[in-house]
Image (tube, helix red, strand yellow):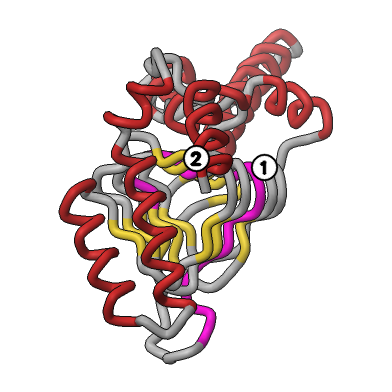
């Protein structure tokens, strides 16, 4: 138990630049306290002491503001940063080296007792502040869930999920290598590939429309030089692609 506690403290110090000492982490980090109490509650749960496990979980929630069901499975070196408002359901499984920020819910969408209702986070997943991951699917190794995203389907390994409902950004090999190099401290899950794919698509459509408008103007000028008359349409409000791009940023 003490070796695992030392491992947890070292992991927090490595990932949080605000952590100044092991003593500070041990005494002042509610995420660590919640995990310690969860281990007690989970031991009771697995040994048939269901009520005692739930009661310890309830005490942990009262003290830390973090609610972890005693039936949840949590791996090593998991870091719940700040943590207030985190809810982790009964059948949730969290792999080693995951990071979870405040306001996160790992919840279920089914009422079937005994079924896998809550998500599985594989190794190294980052779940950003306010995100809701709902359902009995898997979030792949090294994936990132953006702030306030609502995820209701599987996320591939190394991908980023953003938006409501969450849209999946799958990184290419080069960006994945760059991302891996910056993952030791990814503040609130903010990464280099967190652009919303819908926003990217809108930028692409605006740029394409601007290019087409420019081509139409060139065609009209060429026809006029050739002596071919063109019907003049009522002038519309001028298209400003730069302004539209700012609106969808």
Number of marks: 2
- Above or below — where is 41 with respect to 197? below
**Magenta span:** 115-131
Residue 127 sits inside the magenta stretch? yes
Question: Residue 207 placed where, x, y %?
Answer: 59, 25
Q: What residue lies at 33% left-to-right and 44% top-to-bottom?
A: 33
Q: How far apart are marks 2 and 1 (CA)?
A: 23 Å
Question: Residues at badges 2 and 1 in contact (C-beta under 8 Å)?
Answer: no
- Graded by Cα atoms within 10 Å as few (under 14), some (14 to 19) or many (20 or more), the crowding at tag 1 reads many
- Graded by Cα atoms within 10 Å as few (under 14), some (14 to 19) or many (20 or more), the crowding at tag 2 reads some
Query: What residue did someone put label 2 on?
Result: 5
Residue 241 sits inside the magenta stretch? no
Q: What residue lies at 45% left-to-right and 22% top-to-bottom?
A: 16
- Out of 177 and 211, give the one closest to the viewer: 177
Secondary element at tag 2: helix
Question: Residue 201 placed where, x, y %?
Answer: 58, 38
Magenta residues, dominant SS class? loop
Q: What residue lies at 52% left-to-right and 57% top-to-bottom?
A: 74
- Out of 3 and 85, give the one closest to the viewer: 3
Q: From where the camera sits, is residue 229 visible?
A: no
- Out of 73 and 164, give the one closest to the viewer: 73
Query: What residue did someone put label 1 on?
Result: 142
Question: Residue 100 placed where, x, y %?
Answer: 44, 43
Q: What residue lies at 71% left-to-right and 8% top-to-bottom?
A: 225
- Above or below — where is 224 with respect to 105? above
């Amino acid at each position: 138990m003490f070796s695992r506690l030392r491992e947890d403290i070292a992991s927090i110090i490595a990932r949080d630049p605000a952590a100044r000492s092991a003593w500070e982490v041990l005494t002042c980090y509610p995420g660590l306290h919640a995990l310690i109490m969860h281990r007690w509650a989970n031991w009771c749960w697995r040994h048939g002491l269901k009520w005692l496990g739930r009661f310890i979980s309830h005490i942990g929630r009262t003290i830390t503001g973090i609610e972890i069901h005693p039936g949840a499975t949590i791996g090593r070196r998991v870091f719940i940063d700040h943590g207030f408002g985190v809810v982790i359901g009964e059948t949730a499984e969290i792999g080693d080296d995951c990071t979870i920020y405040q306001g996160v819910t790992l919840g279920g969408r089914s009422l079937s007792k005994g079924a896998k209702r809550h998500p599985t986070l594989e190794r190294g997943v980052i779940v950003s502040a306010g995100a809701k991951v709902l359902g009995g699917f898997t979030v792949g190794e090294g994936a990132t869930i953006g702030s306030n995203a609502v995820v209701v389907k599987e996320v591939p390994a190394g991908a980023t999920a953003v938006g409501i409902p969450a849209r999946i950004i799958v990184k290419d090999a080069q960006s994945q290598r760059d991302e891996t190099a910056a993952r030791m401290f990814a503040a609130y899950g903010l990464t280099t590939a967190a652009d919303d794919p819908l926003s990217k698509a809108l930028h692409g459509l605006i740029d394409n429309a601007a290019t087409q408008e420019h081509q139409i103007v060139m065609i009209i000028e060429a026809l006029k030089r050739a002596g071919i008359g063109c019907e003049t349409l009522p002038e519309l409000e001028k298209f400003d692609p730069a302004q539209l791009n700012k609106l969808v940023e």
